[in-house]
């Protein structure tokens, strides 16, 4: 669910905005996106279902906030895998350069 | 953390050997098994599927299938796999394989080798992190992740 939620350019841009500029309402988000509010809502709901963001009612609007823990966990796994690749590439290099 | 980079891995290294030589190290089973530290059962070729078994200290004995999707010498070598899908009692067919793409570019008299891995989902990510992983760092975080999200079969 996490990567399906992330596998969309608009959703990634929404997340980047929430990450860089902090919690925002749909109006504030729609300001930077040239798509309909309806489309933004659809994307935000997708991200909320994946628990990447959560919404809280503030007056008449919902304010959306990033759940940083969720992405950080996935990132940690990716870091572990990436280091595994670094190690493999280093061994490939040694194999070819040192005749190992 | 870069949100736009999440979900894929890109790594590069410069090697002082020409592309054709690097290609052989990637696609010749005997050489691949040496530096990649796997036992390989089957022939490496486009459309072929082999079994690989890990041999690295600490995570040896994990056996899984690898499908070779594309071989364009000496430029591009693509495979798909699901390392960590090793429990005979589990049906992994609904879980996606990740795609590994090696790209070789001439760089001076040597070769720039890039590897990219894409196609993770949450479950495959957790399993995958257990295999070929660098156990020296990040391991406790991975275990915490697994304990929170693991299925009973893990």
Image: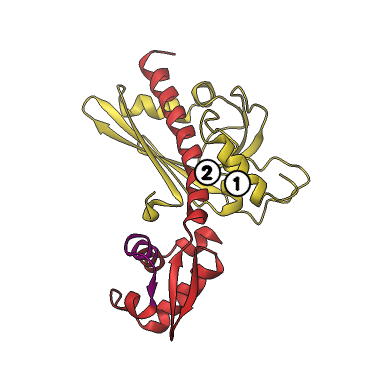
* Residue B83 appears in view: no
**Which residue is outermost to the right?**
B89
A93 to the left or right of B39: left
- Residue B92, placed above or below residue A51: above
Q: Chain of mark 2?
A: A
| Count of marks overlaid on the render | 2
**Which residue is outermost to the bottom?**
A60
The numbered disc on residue B145 is 1
**Which residue is outermost to the left?**
B108
The numbered disc on residue A38 is none
Give me the residue at 63% from left, 40% from top.
Answer: B84
Q: Which residues are drawn in magenta?
A: A15-25
Q: CB under 8 Å between callouts 2 and 1?
A: yes
The numbered disc on residue A77 is 2
Colour chosen for chain A: red
Give me the residue at 56% from left, 47% from top.
Answer: B125
- Residue B109, placed above or below residue A28: above
Give me the residue at 38% from left, 13% from top.
Answer: A98
Give me the residue at 60% from left, 22% from top.
Answer: B57
Front: mark 2 or 1: 1
């Amino acid at each position: 669910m996490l990567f399906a939620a992330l596998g969309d350019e608009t959703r990634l841009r929404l997340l980047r905005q929430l990450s860089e500029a902090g919690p925002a309402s749909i109006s504030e988000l729609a300001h930077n996106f040239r798509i309909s509010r309806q489309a933004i809502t659809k994307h935000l709901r997708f991200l909320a279902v994946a628990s990447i963001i959560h919404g809280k009612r503030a007056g008449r609007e919902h304010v959306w906030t990033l759940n940083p823990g969720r992405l950080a966990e996935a990132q940690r796994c990716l870091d572990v895998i990436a280091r595994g690749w670094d190690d493999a590439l280093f061994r490939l290099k040694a194999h070819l350069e040192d005749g190992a | 953390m870069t949100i736009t980079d999440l979900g894929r891995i890109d790594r590069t290294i410069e090697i002082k050997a020409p592309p054709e030589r690097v290609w052989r190290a990637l696609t010749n089973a005997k050489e691949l098994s040496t530096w990649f530290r796997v036992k390989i059962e089957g022939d490496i070729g486009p459309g072929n599927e082999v079994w690989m078994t890990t041999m690295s200290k600490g995570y040896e004995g994990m056996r899984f299938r690898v499908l070779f999707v594309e071989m364009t010498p000496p430029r591009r070598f693509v495979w798909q796999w699901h390392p960590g899908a090793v429990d005979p009692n589990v049906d992994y067919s609904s879980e996606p394989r990740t795609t590994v793409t090696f790209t070789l570019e001439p760089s001076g008299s040597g070769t720039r080798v890039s590897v990219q891995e894409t196609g993770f989902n949450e479950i495959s990510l957790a399993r995958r992190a257990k295999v070929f992983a660098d156990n020296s760092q990040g391991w406790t975080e991975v275990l915490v992740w697994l304990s929170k999200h693991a299925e009973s079969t893990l």
